[in-house]
Amino acid sequence: MTLLMEDTGTAVRAGDVQAFEAFVRANDRKLRGVAWAVVRNAEQTDDIMQSAYEKAFRALPNFDGRSSMTTWLHSIIYRTAIDYVRYEGRRRHTDIDQMRNVGGSTDAASHGIHRMELGDVMDQMSPEERGTLMLVTGLGYSYDDAAEILGESRGTIASRVSRARTRISRWTDSEEEQS
């Protein structure tokens, strides 16, 4: 069964559970990229997506249609992911790898780490920078659309993307120097 996006959006806004489920299934891969960019963990992304979809379904009666359903869901997913990171940041966690290395050498070379990986560069970015970068460069949203999704100004979006690209550029330059 092929559902037209407009028909699906209308049915979803009317509270049709099957239409919402079909819409989520059709768009899940694209939508989850933002959550993953913020937390960089598959299990946490799944938790965030479940929570965000529940929030979205409960909020359907308030969806006014000023933006597309996908843009609206990206906004909910992003805010849910940021809230998750903030909550987790307040909790105390002990990294099992750090526990194993207590009393051991902390010299990076002794652990066989000779160069930084792109994932490490991404980890140095704030969750907000990663999420914004994913929306603009990964999913192709314009700065204006990303600003709408994130509830930020266009200038904030441009600044986050610029900082993120600068970090990646520095990493790329250092990789070329090491080669």
Image (tube, helix red, strand yellow):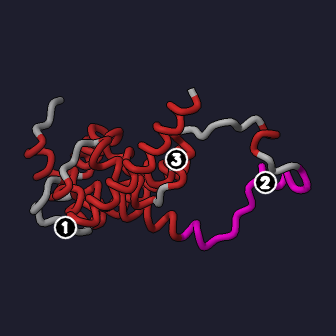
Residue at 40% in and 52% down: 164
**Which residue corresponds to mark 3?**
121
Q: Nearer the viewer, mark 3 or mark 2?
A: 3
Q: Position of residue 29 (x, y in %)?
A: 35, 38
Nearer mark to the viewer, of 3 and 1: 3
Residue 38 lies in quadrant: bottom left
Residue tagged by mark 1? Answer: 61
Amino acid at pointer 1: Pro
Going from N to C along the chain, the mark reached first, 3 or 1, is: 1
Q: Which residue is mark 2?
A: 98
Residue 118 among those drawn in magenta = no
Dividing the picture into quadrants, the one containing residue 113 is top right
With 151 as the anchor, is 112 left or right in this view?
Answer: right
- x then y, percent, for residue 98: 78, 54
Q: Is residue 125 left or right of residue 101?
A: left
- View extreme (right): residue: 103
- Label 3 or label 2, whichever comes before in sequence order: 2
Amino acid identity at mark 2: Gln
Marks 1 and 2 close (CB-CB < 8 Å): no
Can you say which quadrant of the picture contains the C terminus? Answer: top right
User: Residue lying furthest bottom in this view?
Assistant: 90
Marks 3 and 1, how far apart at CA: 40 Å
Quarter that holds the N terminus = top left
Q: Farthest residue to the top: give it.
A: 179
Instruction: Check if mark 3's residue and mark 2's residue have beta carbons within 8 Å.
Output: no
Circle 1 Cα neighbour tier, 10 Å, few/some/many (<14 / 14–19 / ≥20): few
Checking the image for residue 122, the label placed there is none
Q: Is residue 82 above or below residue 177?
A: below
Position of residue 174 measured from the top left corner of the image (x, y, whole percent): 53, 38
Range shown magenta: 87-104
Residue 165 horizontal/vertical position (percent): 37, 48
Q: Residues within 10 Å of mark 3 (few under 14, many from 20)?
A: some
